[in-house]
Amino acid sequence: MKAPATPQSWQRATLGELVNLSTGKLDANAAVDRGRFPFFTCAEAISRIDNYAFDTDAVLLAGNGSFSVKRYSGKFNAYQRTYVIEPIQISLNFLYWLTRGHISLITQGERGSTIPYIRKGDITGVELSLPPLAEQKIIADKLDTLLAQVENTKARLECIPQILKRFRQSVLTVAISGELTKDWRNSSHLGNWTSGALGDFIEKPKYGTSAKSLKDGLIPVLRMGNLQDGKLDWSDLVYSSDLAEIEKYQLTPGDVLFNRTNSPELVGKTSIYRGEREAIYAGYLIKIKCSELLNPEFLNYHLNSPYAKDYYKAVKSDGVSQSNINAKKLSAYPIHCPPIEEQAEIVRQIEQLFAFADTIEKQINNALARVEYLTQSILAKAFRGELTEQWREDNPHLISGDNSATALLMRIHAERVAKPPKKKIIRARAR
């Protein structure tokens, strides 16, 4: 764990030489609403608690999960997997950025298959280059300014996917109301829209197979998780080799799959099967086959619209932990259906607008990746001494003699000798 080349006035050290390191002692569920003090856990959000165990300047590093880094001065408490890193004669703000700048080194040996975690030695063993104290403060100030601007840009970019989500829902709303194709309809002189229940436009809905699926087999069995954003996700598949099941539940292009049970926000998710590969469908799904009066693509968009979601909420039957829409309720879904030619035009315009939104979303994701790279680039420059190169030339007296990094390290070592780590108290057991 070696640091890159840095100015000659900086001194090599390990992070463990520069800090006192401990952890909290509490479970995460020790948090209380409106507590008097901050309570730092491994979550991004800061909880509250009514008692404190620390009264100090510290950097808080989550020991598992996202490995988030925070800084705080004053009274607080901490979760038992949160590392409390207290600076010894170095700048708190510099230590915060130092930890963030070296987080990839700290976490490179992360352990755990489900939730990754780090150990004390992963923090204390990181090698770095230490600038003089005055330069630390300059670096921290520059990073506070530069990265605040970067974070502001990132926050704005992160809002756009949610805006695009609302845009897509608005498109579906105007599409199924007829507003999207109003001008096209007036110029086409087609017939009127027909109102009725979904059951009037489809064959009888059918439930999928309840047979147990296998990790390997002849044909994929599509499940709830394979229905994503109106399309089929062909990852995380299970299979069947039962020939009778395959014949009975075989999908054909144009079949619409409906998720009939799960948590309320997931019930009603649909996707259309376009014949990408052979497949059957599981018991928690309902297969809908349209008549010649109903375009499957139009129905798929209709059933994913806000109007449909309101219907599901109104008619769902609540179980202990999940909701359910059965075939009867699905067949009763009220639908206002245009002529088949207009349905095709609605699908065309929806796909055109969605493609526009998808393009913007890709651009946003690329921009977010560049912002993340920019953050890492600025931190790397800071800890190579590049942000303060001119400052060192202008202030040689602040990086030499008693102000040097060498003198600072000597003072830190002297404080460590004067205040050795507390020894654990071993209590004798009662006989």
Image (spheres, helix red, strand yellow):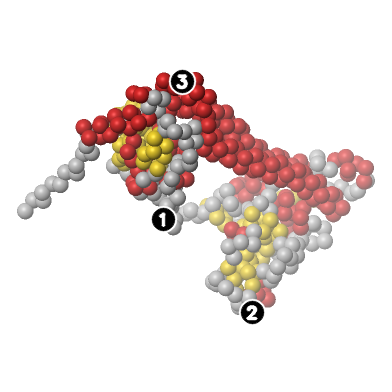
Give the quarter of the image for residue 291. Answer: bottom right
Image depth: mark 1 or mark 3 in front: 3
Q: Local crowd at mark 1 within 10 Å, few (<14), some, or many (≥20)?
A: few
Amino acid type of the residue tagged 2 in the rendering: Leu
Kindly identify which numbered label has been placed on residue 366. none
Q: Position of residue 128 (x, y in %)?
A: 41, 40
Gap in angstroms between the C-alphas marked 1 and 2: 41 Å
The residue under the point 79% across, 46% down is 352
Q: 140 left or right of 303?
A: left
- Are dots 1 and 2 in contact, CB under 8 Å? no
The residue under the point 42% across, 37% down is 129
In the image, 237 versus 5, the foreground residue is: 5
Give the residue pinned by disc 1.
112
Who comes first in sequence, dot 3 or dot 2?
2
Q: Position of residue 393 (x, y in %)?
A: 50, 23
Q: Position of residue 367 (x, y in %)?
A: 65, 39
Q: Residue furthest left?
A: 431
* Residue 107, placed above or below residue 159: below
The residue under the point 80% across, 40% down is 179
* Residue 337, placed above or below residue 85: below
Mark 2 falls on what kind of element?
Answer: helix
Amino acid type of the residue tagged 1 in the rendering: Gly
Q: Position of residue 304 (x, y in %)?
A: 68, 50
Kindly identify which numbered label has been placed on residue 395. 3
Q: 48 left or right of 366?
A: left
Give the quarter of the image for residue 231. Answer: bottom right
In the image, 116 versus 231, the foreground residue is: 116
* Residue 108, placed above or below residue 246: above
Gap in angstroms between the C-alphas marked 1 and 3: 47 Å
Give the residue pinned by disc 2.
243
